[in-house]
Image (spheres, rainbow, N blue to C red):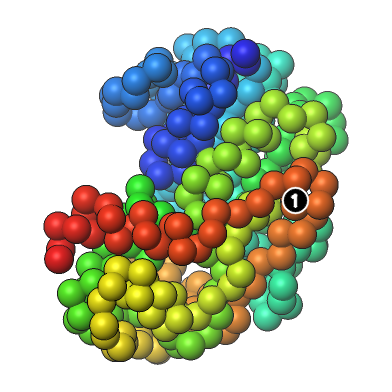
């Protein structure tokens, strides 16, 4: 049994915590505001300001699942500070540092994206994530920490109602209303199941074979938004052809003049206008991991309390 500190308790944090507890680890959950999680200890910490971080107990690994407000300026200001504070916290404890990552820093339109590909960001958010990764693995190379990064695509799951494919998508879909989406509904996109993300993050905390590199979470084959909607309706026994209103990039850019969040969304619009495909073959081959079948994920979403409440 290892002592593991998880920073953040959003959907990915919760999935990671659940997996660690199931495996019998001693888990401390660090967030800015008090929460209650059975079989885990809570402690206040803000990884951006470093408040409370020095008071976190000794541990064998730190898993960073925290979120940063979704705006370009917030990411540019907060992510580097958080990365430095995480590295220092792990170094002082002799702990492995596991960072939750995404696909933003890969070169645009070079598909599929592989975990071994160089990071060539084409947007401000990707540049921030590339810098975080550089600091993480520089610290690993210098012997300060043992580092791992676990990357996934846009996540999806019954426990992630605020995700891009969350309430805003499934609620109107399941009551046969038109769905507003970004980009083209017929372009294929990889989605990562929340439990799969949590499982690989938990494994990364203790598996010696994972140290020193990035890994992609095994995910279901890329699928278009339209086909995903059709499968959801079919599994729910609802006869309906999904209808979409597509927000083009120019509209997102206009909205970005008034909203920092929409400005960030507009900078990443190519994810939804072009094919966005993640390759996870090395994780499957080297670690023996697999993905949750998409139908299982979609059934869980259809049966979730928030989806049922809308029907």
Q: On the picture, is 1 further left or further right than 308?
A: right
Q: How many marks?
A: 1
Q: Residue at x 25, y 76 (%)?
A: 238
Residue drawn at x 51%, y 72% as measured from the top left? 268
Q: Looking at the figure, which quarter contains the C terminus?
A: bottom left
- Image check: 116 left or right of 148? right
Q: Residues within 10 Å of mark 1 (few under 14, many from 20)?
A: some
Point out residue 113 in the picture as x, y percentages from the top left corner: 71, 68
Estimate the x, y position of residue 240 in percent, counting from the top left.
26, 85
Residue at the image position 29 percent from the left and 23 percent from the top: 36
- In which quadrant will I find the N terminus? top right
- Residue, disc 1: 283
Q: How far across and down, in percent of the image, does residue 135 sit?
A: 71, 42
**Secondary structure state at the residue bearing disc 1:** helix
Q: Residue at x 46, y 39 (%)?
A: 15
Percent x, y of residue 126? 60, 62
Report the front residue among 13 and 52: 13
């Amino acid at each position: 049994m290892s002592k593991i500190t998880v920073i953040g308790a959003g959907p990915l944090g919760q999935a990671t915590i659940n997996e660690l507890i199931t495996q019998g680890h001693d888990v401390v959950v660090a967030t800015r505001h008090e929460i209650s999680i059975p079989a885990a200890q809570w402690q206040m910490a803000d990884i951006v300001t470093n408040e409370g971080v020095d008071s976190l107990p000794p541990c064998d690994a730190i898993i960073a699942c925290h979120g940063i407000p979704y705006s370009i300026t917030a990411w540019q200001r907060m992510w580097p500070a958080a990365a430095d504070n995480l590295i220092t916290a792990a170094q002082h404890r002799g702990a492995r540092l596991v960072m939750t990552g995404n696909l933003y820093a890969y070169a645009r339109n070079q598909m599929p994206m592989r975990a071994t590909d160089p990071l060539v960001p084409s947007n401000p958010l990707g540049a921030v994530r590339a810098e975080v990764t550089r600091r993480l693995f520089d610290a690993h190379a210098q012997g300060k920490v043992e580092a791992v990064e676990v990357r996934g695509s846009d996540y999806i799951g019954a426990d992630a109602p605020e995700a891009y494919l969350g309430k805003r998508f499934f609620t109107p879909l399941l009551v046969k209303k038109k769905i507003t989406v970004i980009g083209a509904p017929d372009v294929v996109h990889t989605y990562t199941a929340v439990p799969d993300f949590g499982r690989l993050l938990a494994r990364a905390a203790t598996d010696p074979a994972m140290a020193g590199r990035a890994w992609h979470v095994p995910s279901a084959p890329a699928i278009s938004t339209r086909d995903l909607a059709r499968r959801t309706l079919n599994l729910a026994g609802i006869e309906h052809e999904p209808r979409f209103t597509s927000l083009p990039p120019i509209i997102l850019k206009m909205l970005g003049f008034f909203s920092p969040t929409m400005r960030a969304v507009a900078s990443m619009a190519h994810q939804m206008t072009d094919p966005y495909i993640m390759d996870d073959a090395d994780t499957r081959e080297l670690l023996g991991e697999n993905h949750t079948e998409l139908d299982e994920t979609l059934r869980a979403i259809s049966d979730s309390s928030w989806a049922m409440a809308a029907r």
